[in-house]
Image (cartoon, grey):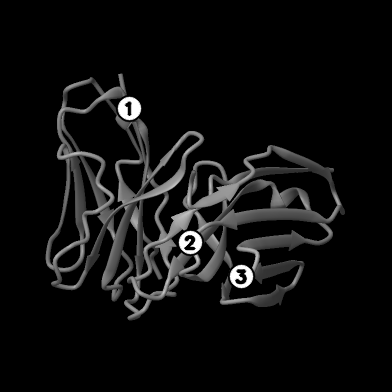
Amino acid sequence: QKEVEQDPGPLSVPEGAIVSLNCTYSNSAFQYFMWYRQYSRKGPELLMYTYSSGNKEDGRFTAQVDKSSKYISLFIRDSQPSDSATYLCAMSDSTSYGKLTFGQGTILTVHP
Amino acid sequence: GAGVSQSPSNKVTEKGKDVELRCDPISGHTALYWYRQSLGQGLEFLIYFQGNSAPDKSGLPSDRFSAERTGGSVSTLTIQRTQQEDSAVYLCASSYYLAGGGNEQFFGPGTRLTVL
């Protein structure tokens, strides 16, 4: 079993929909939780960053972390075709130097 | 400013040949990471460099893989006697060093390696 599980999708939604992306993990030492967005043939770019449990909002994006359930989510409101990409969850613990453990990535398509 | 750059962007090689992949990190970033992205596997950590410290090679899949970082800047990932299962996108990332983790890593565009 992988340390981080993420449904690879693909996920296809109409423009304007609310998108929910999720990851579960098994390592209770993880404390830093990130969501990366990766466009086709590009490197991942950091979208959201959360330390420990709680919610964080940035524009149309909201990240949630529930450490008790070992579950993290990314919500995208009013989704746009430009949001079409692969979304990767990533996490690291506080005893290392920031080595990231990634989920498989979810392919999202937002159609007009 | 310039981001992380990688070269070549694409590399096609024959099974059994050696390949070298290059990464130029963001200026001032002392931490450098290599990851591999295979179809359906997500990103897998390969190796980490920080300053002059000994690298963490714990993610390298076999002794055919090696990496070095010269002068604390440019890094080269070498794969010897390539196999078809080495086909993947190799991504480099750099960051400032933060003890205890939590640093933001900036990724390059990757090198797409195809082993025939």
Do badges 3 and 1 share one subunit? no
Q: Secondary structure at mark 2?
A: loop
Q: Earlier in the sequence, mark 3 or mark 2?
A: 2
Query: Looking at the picture, how far across and down is residue B48, in whole percent?
Result: 26, 61
CA distance for labels 3 and 1: 35 Å
Per the image, the residue denoted by label 2 is A27
The kind of secondary structure element at disc 3 is: loop
Q: As shown in the figure, which amino acid type bears the numbered disc 1? A: Glu
Mark 3 crowdedness (10 Å alpha carbons): few <14, some 14-19, many ≥20: some
User: In which quadrant will I find the C terminus of chain B?
Assistant: top left
Residue A112 located left or right of residue A22: right
In percent of width and height, residue B106 lies at 42, 64
Q: Residue at x 62, y 55 (%)?
A: A23
Measured from the top left, where is residue A57 in percent x and y? Answer: 72, 75
Q: In the shown orientation, is residue B39 left or right of residue A112?
A: left
Q: Decide: is A84 above or below B68.
A: above
Which mark is on residue B71? none
Whole-number angstrom distance, CA of label 1 to CA of label 2: 28 Å
The numbered dot on residue B85 is: 1
Residue identified by numbered label 3: A67
The residue at the point 69 percent across, 47 percent down is: A84
Residue A79, relative to residue A104: is it above or below?
below
Residue under the point 20% across and 65% down? B73
